[in-house]
Amino acid sequence: MRIIRLILSAFVLLVTTGVAHAAAPVKDVDYVMLGSPQTTIAGKKVEVIEFFAYYCPHCNALEAPLEKWVKAQGDNIVFKRVHTSVTGEEVPQQRLYYTLEAMGKVDEFHSKVLFAIHSQRKHLDSEDDIADFIATQGIDRQKFLDAYHSFAVQSKVTRALQMQNSYEIRTWPTIVVDGRFVTAPPIVGAAMDPYNENVAQDMMLKVLDGLVLQQLKERNK
């Protein structure tokens, strides 16, 4: 009887170890390494950056599951967003995001902007369009425009463009963990045939779980 229990215990250990190993993110399959690692200032927490754009339908599709994932991580991570530009130069929606950030209103209006663009089909691709939309949302138009043209917002936009370049971001949404580990739904779903965006999103979030856990363990060594 004792021998049977030992065999069963060994079998359970083998299975659970195999599962844990299988769940561990794999380089060049689940993520790639950033060519030039970037400095982070998250301390004991793990920095997670989403490179996104308001106009990007795939970013809009990822927003709800990613937001849920971020909340579940709690104090394990410092989560940041960086608004990208398809041209490599400033675009109005970038300035919209950083104006909301400067005014402390991203949490309140981020999903509203995505809904307006992707569900209500509002373009929001010019200063006038953006200001008109903001005015309908209860924000004083002139106060918004003052912030929109401020030095602080310009600095944020400039920094975003620099980060897009230094983090070698070519497509979005892209997630970077601790300034080194780069993943995205198309990376983890590259072998899928046919490709399923929802499944790839879920796979990527599990990869993020693994990367965050890995980096937390590194901090506690």
Image (cartoon, rainbow, N blue to C red):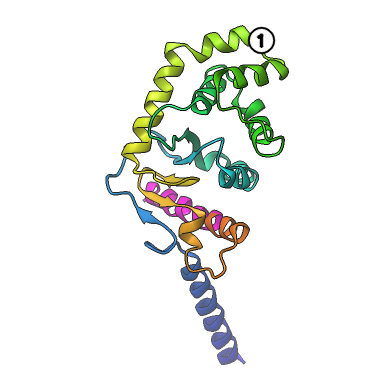
Task: For residue 40, say whether it is visible.
Answer: no
Q: Residue visible at 60% across and 62% down?
A: 196
Q: Is residue 148 left or right of residue 115?
A: left
Is 204 magenta? The answer is no
Picture coordinates of residue 98 (x, y %)?
A: 51, 23
Q: Tell me how many marks there are.
A: 1
In the displayed structure, does residue 141 sit left or right of residue 78? right
The answer to which of 13 and 47 lies nearer the viewer is 47
What residue span does the magenta drawing correspond to? 205-221
Q: Residues within 10 Å of mark 1 (few under 14, many from 20)?
A: few
* Amino acid type, label 1: Asp
Majority SS type along the magenta span: helix
Residue 156, horizontal then vertical, whole percent: 43, 22
Q: Which residue is mark 1?
A: 140
Residue nearest the observer in this picture, 191 or 116: 116
Look at 59% across and 86% down and name the residue there.
5
